[in-house]
Image (tube, rainbow, N blue to C red):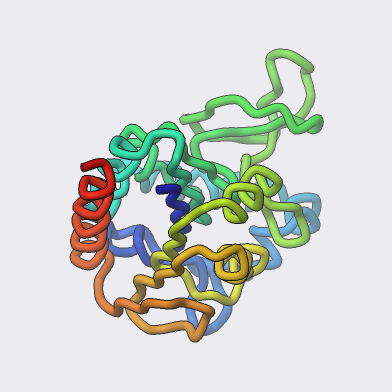
Amino acid sequence: MRVCVLTGAGISAESGVPTFRDAGGLWEGHRVEDVATPEGFERDPVCVYRFYDERRKSLGTVEPNPAHHALAKLEAALGEDFLLVTQNIDDLHDRCGHVRLRHMHGELLAARNEYGDVLPWRDDLGESDRCPTTGTRLRPHVVWFGEMPLHMLEIEEFLSSCDVFCAIGTSGLVYPAAGFASIAFHAGAHCVEINLQATGGPFHEVRTGAAGTMVPAWVDELLTEIDAEHG
């Protein structure tokens, strides 16, 4: 059985990570255009650096919840037949030991140079920081609006060949991730949504409720099915 899981802000919100935008279109008090676009970075890099420094520091105040741990348990059982794709830039999945994890929107704990080379980064990041290899300016390793998400070819190939697709804590509004269910659905996968509210996407099964409760239950059911397949 090949399983692809997509996670969004909802799974991290249960650990205390603020969701992307509030109802007023602000991201933690900032206009999205100011802190999540290439234009905003060029206009006021100091503001953008400071914004992501604060978010990076906040990771020390949160921990993975039962949903994160359950998905790590699922990967341990499936190995290369599992792929976890996250829209989140926090490190909560990483802390659970995932190997088959793809951060499609980048990572808070990384920086990249002007050539796209990525390096781990846990400290504050500013205008004076330079890539040790190229000497060029560094920026947060975060995919901003107007930029192409990461790992798309690998993700779409896996979606086209998986048996089960599950979207957890996603709004179903942000593309290209919002189209993943359709890709998997049309490829013949059984599509499951776990969310506080149904999004109306092409899912065979919708489970509404908190991810910390619903995801471990779904994983246990799936593991029972996998064990039965293997006799």
Give the percent coordinates (x, y) of residue 92.
35, 45
Residue visible at 39% across and 65% down in the picture: 168
Is residue 231 shown above or below 145? above
- Nearer the observer, 227 or 150: 227
Instruction: Give the total of numbered labels.
Output: 0
Report x, y in % for residue 97: 33, 32
Apparent side of residue 4 relative to residue 130 in the rendered image (left or right): left
- In this rendering, is residue 218 above or below 100? below
Q: Image quadrant of residue 11?
A: bottom left
Relative horizontal placement of residue 89, taking residue 14 as reference (left or right):
right
Q: Can residue 63 be seen in this view?
A: no
**Which quarter shows the C terminus?**
top left
Q: Nearer the viewer, residue 222 or 60?
A: 222
Name the side, left or right, on which 198 lies relative to 33: left
Viewer-closest of 62 and 5: 5
> Which residue, as the protein is rendered here, is positioned at the far front?
231
In the rendered image, residue 87, in percent from the top left (x then y), is placed at 52, 56
Residue drawn 64% across the image and 58% down it = 35
Tell me residue 93's x, y (percent): 37, 44
Res 117 seen here: yes
Locate residue 58 relative to residue 51 in the image: left or right: left
Which residue is at a point 30% across and 35% down the rendered structure image?
76
Q: Residue furthest top?
A: 133
Q: Residue at 52% x, 80% y: name it.
A: 201
